[in-house]
Every structure is written in structure tokens, then in C-alpha cells.
Image (cartoon, helix red, strand yellow):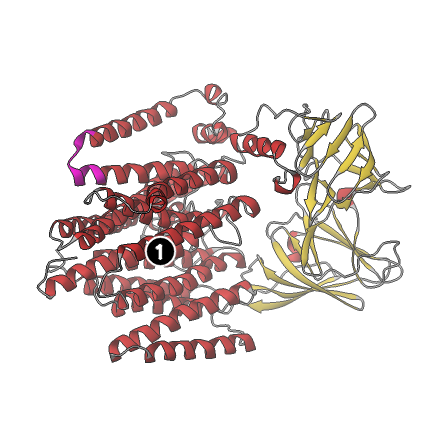
Amino acid sequence: MNRIVNWRFAAGLALALLCALQLFCLLRAPAAFSPSRIDLTLMHGQSQTLGRLELAAPQADSAHIVVRRDASGGWWIRNTSIGRQLALRRDGVDRLTGRTSISTGMRFQIGAAVFTVDGASEHEVAFSDGAQQWRYNGANLFRNGQVLPTCPDTRLAARIVAGWNRWVPAVLSMHRPLRFGGSLHCGNRIGVAGIAPGSAAMADDDGQLVLVAGAGTAPLLVWPGNGQVDLARREEWLGGTCHAAACPPHPVTSMVVGYTRLLMAVDGDTLRMRPVSHVALFAEPRLQLPPQVAWQWQQRDFWSFQMQRAWLAACAATVIAAVVTALRIRTQQARLRAGAAVFLAAAGTGALVLQHLGSPPGLGWSLILAWAALWFALLAAPRVNPVLAAGVTLLAVGLLAQLELALGGANSSWTRYFHKTSALLAIGLGAVVWVLGHRPRVPLPQASAERILLLLAGVALIALALQVAYGDETGVLGLQPVEFAKLALTGLTAHCIALGLGTRQQASDTVLRWLRLVMPALLFLALLGVALVQVDDYSPLVLLMVWTGAMVLAWTLATRRFLPAGILAACACCAVLALAALHGAEPARLAKLNFYADRFLVWLDPGTHPHTGQQLLLGARAIAQGGWRGADGLLGLSTLGLEAGTVPRIPQVQDDFAPSFFLNRHGLAAALALWTLQALFLAGLVQSAARAWQAHHAARDFRHAWLARCRCFALCGGAGFLFGHFLLSWGTNLSIFPVMGQPMSFLSAGGSHLLFFICPLLAIGSACVQSFEESHHAGVRPT
């Protein structure tokens, strides 16, 4: 098939069409305006209520905060929102308002319960309510010296953490906040009649236990001394003169109101605020504001670029690195390819750093960077095969969807997903071309490959441990170690299967032999642990089940043992029947389950869950509006670059529900074309795996046979994970499955999945085909 189809030419035509659509989308976008600076002018003794309109904060309440200036000229702020919080940044640290340190003798009241602090230190608090003696150490809650039993509705992950905290020393314990509210004393919860759970809490804040007011309507009253204070409504000092008894050492430099961050500085009678993220966009620079509030308008600029000294230094270092890399290569063509790959990856890194610093380049520059990455991958690769051709086209489709979302959103935050996708494309595809151009002619020895695989597995396990200890379901330090772990798991499993199917040899080193066999299982268990303990989501489990099925199917076909294949088919049929049975199940029965019952209830009846079911309802409405030819009836061509309406309100529309946005914008007909591209990519991976298995039979020695088998099962594992992502994402958006929380490969916003899994898989698939082609043209048997 590769000889009949010119994949480079076909992919070039598709890429040129998609780039033209992206350019048309950018040029057609209407003008949008936002405040570059917000000035609040107050005289001594005056105050002003600010909210969604005055601060250009789309997610804030209409009356979110009150800013007051006292008689001595000091500026003070108070949160007046009932359900939303306010974060203030002092000395480089963001802290929510409505919290206070705990001291001995302090009293606090939530509902009808009044507590008195008997003793307090940085890591432990002892308090009483007149009837019970309580002690909390950041991990466990004790009543009269006894640890409370876990709550009946506690999930499996929380039960495991609670059991861990009871048996390990305090240094190794995992922090769990103490919450007030509900009707039971259990776990880390103190029940208070008539108060919703979580209305108040004790939590660790930078190594010190603090008392925190929740987002509920019940006030948390505190008596730090003689006066009574509603903690959630307590005033905080912003700047200027402060004559209070305990003023913070540093003024506020920024605040976050409803996801909108504003930089702040006091200038005499004026408080100057500069919105820097999640800022509302307006069609024209006119708005009726209170007399004390003044805006300075700015128009959205697609070609802005803040040239900083650090950026200039990075550019110079990039040029030097590209030149040094090129000089080390002999042939001129390879020299140019290597230097360009290094420069492209470094440019993507610089763009990512600029975005992290809060001054990303304009959308136009990010689009040019993404174009350079896509065309460079297509033109500079030594050979283009179905895997690379379909992959580059799918990446261009995803880039178009993210650009539409960036231009169609009602606030500035949507652009950050496009910036990140473009930067990671440059990094990932630059690395892919560099790897394809520097693939060693002689395969690595098996021992060297094993050391590399074990190193990857070790790094993945360390990253997963860091996520469990310091991260959450979104990852750690902005990264998702699970994506890198999936790549390592695929490589290690492929290596072990390749060894098992080869000539049986007695290993001289027993420890290394056990590591070869056990490390994939350990990594598998680590993924399960992250899914259950930390992520609190069953979608990684389902994804791993699909991957396991794909690997078992590949093994059965390779060894011609069809009994396991039959068992696998029977399990798949049972899963389909179980899913059909769940569709007709009664919600009351599912509510008794302890395994993610809330997800199934929302899936079966989202209308009775207005908050958690909003994602499914909005997604289904968006898909229904799209129909076959998109919401505009022209496959989305007439709405390119224009406002996206209410579709961006779907939670996680840039990731998990990106297919809903695509179906709404371009219709089911375009989705069928997208499915065809996805099927072509998977077929390319499977075809490459089949060719690798054929090369195994024609190999000259054990090492070449092992390498061919390893390539075969690595490609099958990658195809299995991708098929799982496609299946779960389409199934979630079409309401076939409950909400799974997995991104759509290639279509969703760029992140760890793109950088740590998609791009390496492109490199592996392309390198394998390149090896086959080189062997064929050289007239030798493939290796």
C-alpha cells in the first residue's frame, strides 16, 4: 500500500487545506476588547462593591468583594460572596481569605456547636466542645483519645489513606483536612446538626494548621480575643497605611476573583488593578461603570510579542545549540535537519516558558510555530508512512479545533490551551524528527535496551509517587506522570513478551531476570494505585483493561493460541451486555453501590443532578445542535473564527468534551472523516506491527529476532492505548459510557498526553517503518 499511495503528498494536501482553514479562522476573527487596567479611586472613609462587571471577571459574583479605605488611608478588602472564595497574594504566596491561625484559648462556633482551643502547636490542635475532647494532628482525628471509625460513605481511596495514617509515624502520614458538618462523628469529620458537611475545616497551610471557613451559608464565628468575627467576611489589609494590631508584613500584590487574576498596586487615592488572566472580552470598548471605577481599554492583538532579555538570551543559546549540533553531523542534509529540529524544540520550550511567565506571544505567532512543527515533521522526516501522515493530519485537526475554541470563547483564558498545544507540538515533533534522523544503523544491544527500559520505568514510578504524595487528579507540577508511565509500561511489557517468545535461555543474573518479569507488573500496580488512591476515577482502570485486552489479543494471534482470544471475545461481549443492563438499571439500586455510584447515577439520570449532570446535558445539547452538517449547516465553515456561543460552558470542553465541541461546530459528517483518520492511524500501527512480526521470522540471529518482536508488541500496546482513548472519549461524549475523564487523542488540548505518549508513539511507529524500508532498499532481510 505504501508503494501505491504517496503518503507525503496526500498528507501535504490535507495539511495545506487545514492550514488554510486555520489562517481563515484567524483573519476572520472579530475585534475584541478587554480592560488593560482598572482604577478604583476612593477617598478616606469610602468603600465600593466590585464584582463580575467592574472587574471583568466572568466567574465572579455580581457583588463579590467590598474594597474600603479607612480614615488613615489604608486599603482593606472583604469577601461578600456566599459560594465563591477570594485569594490574595502576599510575598509570592496565594492564600484564600476566610482562614486564621489557631491559638490557645481561641473559641470558634459553627452552627450551634462552640469549641474552645485547649492547646495548639504548628502540627497539632487540642480542643473541646464541653462534652467531648478532640485532638487533630493533620492526618487523624481523635475523640477522647480514640481514633474515629471511617464514615459509611467513604470511598475506597480514602479508606486506604486512613488505614495508612493509623499505622505509620506522623512523618510518613498523608494529610487529610478535618471537616465540620453533617450528622455523624466519623473519619476526619465532626458532625454538627443542621450544618452541611465541609462548612468549616482545619487544614495544613504551609506547615501550620489553620481554621478555614467553607463556601457554605453557615457562618464560622471566631473569638480570637474579646471580639467576635465572621471569619469568611473578615477584612484583609491590601496596602497603604496600617494601624491595626497585627498587620501583615507585605501588602497584597495580586488577587484571584472567580479565576480572574488581577495585579494590584496602591497609588495614593487610587488602587490600580491589571487583569492578566481569565479576563472578559467585549465586542466594543464601551461599558457603564460606577463613578469610582475607570477602565483603560485594549484591543486583542494576535501579533503581540514581549521581547525580554531572558527571551533574547534563550534565542541566542538556541542558535548556538543548533549550530553545535549541526556541526557534529557529517552530511549537509542531516546537519540541516538536526539543527532545525533542535531550534524548533527550543523555540517551543521558550514559548512554553513565556506562557508560564504570563506573557505568551500572540495567537498568530503560536499558529506559525505550530505550522512550522507540522510541516517540518512532514517534509524533514526521511520517510513518510501511514502512521506519520495520519498523525500529522490528526494533529492539524486538533489544532484547528483548539484555535476555534480560543477565538470563540468569551474570555481570554481560552487562548492558553492553543498556546500550550502549539508549544508542545514544536517540542514533540522537533524531537520526533531528530530521533528519526539519528536512529542508529546498528540496533542497540539487548542489555543496553533493558537498562534504558528499566530507567524509564524507575522515572515513571518516582513521578507517580510524587503525584500521590504532592499532587492530585490533575497531576503534579502541571504534568501527568500516568502518560509517561503508559509509555514505559508498553515498552517493558513488549520487551518481556519478546523475551518469552524467543529462545529460552537461563539467565545468569537471577535479580535481573526477576526485574525483567516483575517490573511491568509493579508498574501496572502503580497505575492501579494512582487510579484508586489519588485520581479517584475509574477511567484509568478501564483504559488499562482495554490495553490489556489488546496485548492479549496480539499475543494470541502471534502464537496462534486462539483459546485466550475466544475468552477475550467472551469477556468483551459480557462487558457490552453489562453496559446494556446498566442502561436499564434502577438508580435506587446503583445508589447502594460503593464503586463510583455517583458517576452511574449522573449517567442514568443527569437531569436530577443539575451540577454534576451539567457536563453530560450541555454536551448532549451541543451534539444535537450540530446535527450532520454542524450548527451552521455548512460544516462549520461560516462560523470559523466567530463566537462559539454557549458550547464553551461545557466543563472540560477543551479536554474530555472536545468531541462535543467538534460535533457541534462541524457536524457528524466531519466526525466521520475524523473517525476515518483515526482508523487509518490505528491501521498503520497494526500494519507496522505485522511487518515487525514478519521480520522476526526472517531475522538472522536472536538479537534481531528479539528486536523485531519487541517492536511488534510495542506498536500493539500503543495502538491498544490509543484505541482505548478513542473508545472512552467518543463513548463519554455520546453518553454511551459514564463520564470517564480521558482526553481525545490528537483533538484535545495539548498536555502530557501529547508530549509523553503521542509524540513518542509517532517516533516509534515511523522509526519501525523507516527500518523496514531501509532494509528493503538495501536488499537485505528486515531487522
The amino acid sitting under disc 1 is Ile
* Residue 38 visible from this viewpoint: yes
Residue 560: say if magenta. yes
The furthest residue to the left: 779
Q: Residue 548 placed where, x, y %?
A: 31, 38
Query: Where, quadrant-wise, is the C terminus in this rendering?
Result: bottom left
Q: Quadrant of residue 522?
A: top left
Task: Give the camera-side residue of 368 and 641.
Answer: 368
Q: Residue 737 placed where, x, y %?
A: 38, 34
According to the image, label 1 marks what residue? 452
Q: Quadrant of residue 339?
A: bottom left
Question: Is 511 above or below relative to 282?
Answer: above
Q: Residue 484 placed where, x, y %?
A: 40, 51
The main secondary structure of the magenta stretch is helix
The furthest residue to the front: 508
* Residue 746 visible from this viewpoint: no
CA neighbours of label 1 inside 10 A, class few (<14), some (14 to 19), many (20+):
some
Question: Is 137 above or below relative to 20?
Answer: above
- Residue at 28% from the left image edge and 28% from the top image edge: 571
Side of 274 where 247 appears, left or right:
right
Q: Secondary structure at mark 1?
A: helix
The stretch of residues the image draws in magenta is 555-563
Side of 100 where 163 appears, left or right:
left
Query: Where, quadrant-wise, is the N terminus in this rendering?
Result: bottom left
Task: Give the camera-side residue of 731 and 702.
Answer: 702
